[in-house]
Image (cartoon, grey):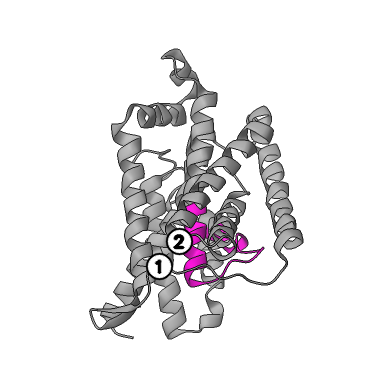
Amino acid sequence: MSVASVLVETAIISALYALVAIGFTLIFGVGGVLNLAHGASITVGAYTTYYVTRVFGYGVGVGILAAVAASGLFGAVLYLGLVKRIQDEPILVMITTLVTAVAIEQVVVVLVGTEEKSIPALLRGNADILGTNVQLNMLAVFVLSWVVIAGLFAFVNYTKAGKALLATSMSHKGAALVGIEADRINLMTWVLAGAIAGLAGVFLGSFQTASYAMGQGPLVLSFTIVVLGGIGSIKGSVLGAYLIGFLEIMTIEYISPSLTGLTPLIVLVAVLLAKPEGLFGRELVEA
């Protein structure tokens, strides 16, 4: 593989990885808790699109909108129904969201079975970029991922709601003093993170497949990326995603494709031992 091919593949896959991880770090940055049901939001998004497109026959655009709505609603129900009352107990939140993730997997197995399901590609065909044959579907995933990431940066930094989110992430007490309701901001964060994860689920399913356990890998990947970039830092998550993506492409090309899943775990252990605060430390949600 040429250097240009490595760069092209790294750029594309890492944009998706950043999208996968960004909701995970958003919830930790604002609420200070780890959402282990993050992968379940990805699964909800993917299967919603599967039903809308394959079962009910609508187009993939409708499937994407339905996935964003369903996974955002899942985030709202999870926060209001379970997390809100225990949000000051991080360990309880971890256990509760982990149980929720397992429950979602079992629900999918009961309703759909263990057989993998295909999701329509966003675009069909191929294109040549710097001598690399790239699926148009992957290019669409790359562009849309960056549109969402840039939109999130703009939302956090230039809107009133985004600045309230930023203030809450820095200090709940300080935010309360200026009239910001932390519970409302937390709800918005869980809905936003769920919607982004659901969209990532559609993108993952469009070039892989949807399966009941498809959220497990992205959860480990998200945890690795946010630890590498600095838990709570959006820009750290984006940089971490690109570092992980580059290492993964290099592992596949020059060592062995069978070691792909091992790369994030090795990076995670190395970062925890050498620089546990990550590249950017805990910068909350500052862009």
Is any atom of residue 107 visible in this view?
Answer: yes
Is any atom of residue 279 visible in this view?
Answer: no
Residue 243: image quadrant is bottom left
Label 2 sits on a secondary structure element that is helix
Inspect the image, locate mark 1, and give the three-letter code of the amino acid beneath it: Ile
Q: Residues within 10 Å of mark 2 (few under 14, many from 20)?
A: many
User: Label 1 vs label 2: CA separation?
Assistant: 21 Å
Q: Residues within 10 Å of mark 1 (few under 14, many from 20)?
A: many
Quadrant for the N terminus, please. Answer: bottom left
Identify whether 127 is placed above or below 26.
Answer: below
Quadrant for the C terminus, please. Answer: top left
Decide if residue 16 is on the left or right side of residue 82.
Answer: left
Give the percent coordinates (x, y) of residue 19.
43, 55
Residue 13 is labelled as 1
Q: Which residue is mark 2?
A: 60
Name the outermost residue toward the left: 130
Decide if residue 195 is on the left or right side of residue 285.
Answer: right
Which residue is rendered at x = 40% and y = 39% of the image? 285
Between 55 and 265, the residue placed more toward the observer is 55
Of the numbered discs 1 and 2, the one sitting upstream in the chain is 1
Range of magenta residues: 197-221
Which residue is rendered at x = 32% and y = 60% of the image? 143
Name the outermost residue toward the front: 57
Give the percent coordinates (x, y) of residue 6.
33, 77
Give the percent coordinates (x, y) of residue 208.
52, 72
Inspect the image, locate mark 2, and give the three-letter code of the amino acid beneath it: Val
Residue 176 sits inside the magenta stretch:
no
Residue 208 sits inside the magenta stretch:
yes
